[in-house]
Amino acid sequence: MNTLYLGDCLNVLRDSVADESVDLIYIDPPFNSKRDYNIFFDDKEIQSQRLAFEDTWSLKNVLDSLHELQTMRTENIHLLLAVYQKVAPHAFPYLVMMALRILELYRVLKPTGSFYLHCDPTMSHYLKTVCDLVFGVEYFENQITWQRTSAHNDPKGFGRNYDQILLYTKSNQNVWNDIRLPYSEDYVSSHYGQKDEKGYFTTRDLTAPDHGNPSKNLKYK
């Protein structure tokens, strides 16, 4: 393909991507965090793209999208989202818009392909139920925890320092390329300074630094 598209992925998928033509899909959609994700639309020539992006998440489009899901004969997804509309209204609009796109991504994925969905813990459990219906629970492969930072202090509780990546396949014929490269000697000596009968290893502390007063940091012993 070797083409970069600017616009709503739903339109691009429907207009430009054939059925079962994609080997691997990784998506990192906007999280449902009420932030302004349109700050990168600064050029006056692409203001229309910004308006289209903002309008995509409007209530009218959400309701239209819910109706479209019903007409696509996706009864179970429509039922699931209708329940979320009642019991999780904060997540409902986001999940409706995501469900339409996940269905299209499923369509273009090859039977041998894999699908990675990057999300945060506030939405991962909702999105997993949508993906379970689209892909099938038997094709859920893994939930990968992506730790964004090392431990840090949070005055109200545990630090929020990770995202989730949901991994699904379309069939049991998926291709998995196990690529491994040996560490260099310099890397081993600098990062794995201890050794026992099982090989080289290292230890790491689980302390949370006091950023306001580094002298009070806890020490691992």
Image (tube, rainbow, N blue to C red):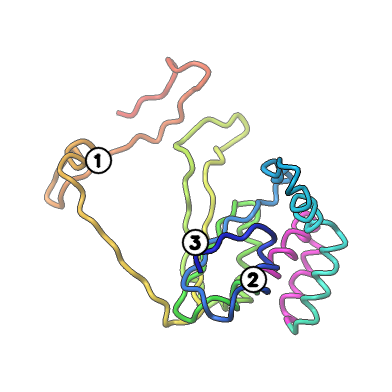
**Quarter placement of the C terminus:** top left
The quarter of the displayed image where residue 56 is located: bottom right
At label 1, counting other C-alpha atoms closer than 10 Å, the crowd grade (few under 14, some 14-19, many 20 or more) is few
Q: Is residue 191 magenta?
A: no
Closer to the N terminus: mark 2 or mark 1? 2
Please give the name of the residue rendered at 69% of the width and 64% of the height, measured from the top-left corner.
98
Where 107 falls versus 121 (above or below)?
Answer: below
Point out the stretch of residues depicted in magenta: 74-103
Considering every residue shown, the one lying at the far front of the view is: 45
Q: Identify which amino acid the numbered label 2 is placed on.
A: Leu
Q: Identify which amino acid the numbered label 3 is placed on.
A: Gln
Kindly indicate whether the residue at mark 3 contacts the one at mark 1 (C-beta within 8 angstroms): no
Q: Closest to the observer: 24 or 215?
A: 24
Closer to the N terminus: mark 2 or mark 3? 2
Horizontally, residue 26 falls left or right of residue 104, namely left
The residue that mark 2 highlights is 13
Spatial separation of the CA atoms under disc 1 and disc 3: 26 Å
Q: Which mark is on residue 143?
A: 3
Q: Closest to the observer: 185 or 110?
A: 110
